[in-house]
Image (tube, rainbow, N blue to C red):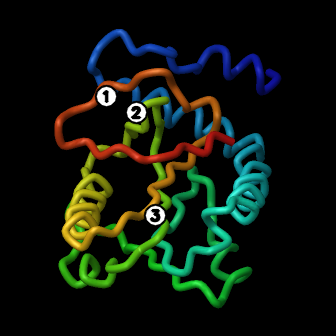
């Protein structure tokens, strides 16, 4: 079956009708699995890296936090090799809480790139359910506000998973910009 036909079956609704994050996660994972199997996720990695490299905000950035990609996420690891002069921080996600020593390392960040299963047009993300990135972003953002510094928070996602509206809770942290590839 052609890839486009299988996407029609698995497409997430543009406006979820309910607040069922678990169902949305299952649907998003199915779409990501399709992208992975078809090789499309690998193609989009190159596009994402090129878009980030050519963005004005990246050119001047020195301290960047981003993620260690899971097999069904857009992998940005090549950035560390292409730009050895930049300081990249990559959390080891073990459990649901970012360690205190890692939070302390996150001072003076200029760019934060986070993954998600889905993002909406308002900047809310649907994660994998543990709350790790929401807690990390909250702690980093609180510190940056206290020091009157700001960082850009960028979400990255395949375009099929960029929705109009996602259900969100009070503890959910928004990103400033979504790169939908």
Where 15 sits versus 151, above or below? above
Q: Where is residue 70 in the image (x, y as percent from the top left)?
A: 52, 59
Q: Where is residue 133 in the image (x, y as percent from the top left)?
A: 32, 56
Q: Nearer the viewer, residue 11 or 157?
A: 157
Label 2, residues with CA under 10 Å away: few <14, some 14-19, many ≥20: some
Distance Cα–Cα, label 1 vs label 3: 24 Å
Q: Position of residue 112 (x, y in %)?
A: 46, 63
Q: Nearer the viewer, residue 2 or 64?
A: 64
Residue at x-position 42% and y-position 64%: 151
Q: Nearer the viewer, residue 120 or 160?
A: 120
Q: Earlier in the sequence, mark 3 or mark 2?
A: 2
Residue placed furthest toward the bottom: 85
Q: Mark 1 points at which residue?
A: 21
Q: Which quarter of the figure is the N terminus placed in? A: top right
Q: Which of marks 1 and 3 is nearer the N terminus?
A: 1
Residue placed furthest toward the front: 148
Q: Mark 3 points at which residue?
A: 112
Q: Mark 2 points at which residue?
A: 25
Distance Cα–Cα, label 3 vs label 2: 23 Å
Helix, strand or loop under label 3: strand
Label 1, residues with CA under 10 Å away: few <14, some 14-19, many ≥20: some
């Amino acid at each position: 079956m052609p890839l486009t036909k299988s996407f029609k079956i698995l497409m997430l609704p543009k406006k979820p009708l309910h607040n069922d994050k678990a169902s949305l996660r299952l649907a998003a994972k199915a779409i990501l699995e399709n992208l992975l199997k078809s090789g499309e996720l690998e193609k989009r990695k190159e596009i994402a890296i090129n878009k980030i490299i050519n963005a004005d905000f990246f050119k001047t950035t020195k301290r960047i936090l981003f993620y260690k990609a899971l097999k069904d996420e857009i992998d940005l690891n090549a950035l560390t090799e292409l730009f050895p002069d930049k300081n990249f921080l990559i959390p080891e996600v073990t459990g649901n809480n970012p360690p205190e020593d890692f939070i302390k390392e996150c001072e003076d960040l200029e760019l934060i790139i986070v993954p998600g299963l889905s993002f909406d047009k308002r900047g809310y993300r649907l994660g994998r359910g543990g709350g790790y990135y929401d807690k990390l972003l909250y702690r980093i953002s609180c510190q940056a506000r206290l020091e009157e510094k700001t960082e850009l928070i960028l979400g990255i996602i395949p375009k099929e998973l960029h929705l109009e509206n996602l259900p969100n809770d009070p503890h959910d942290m928004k990103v400033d910009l979504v790169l939908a590839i």
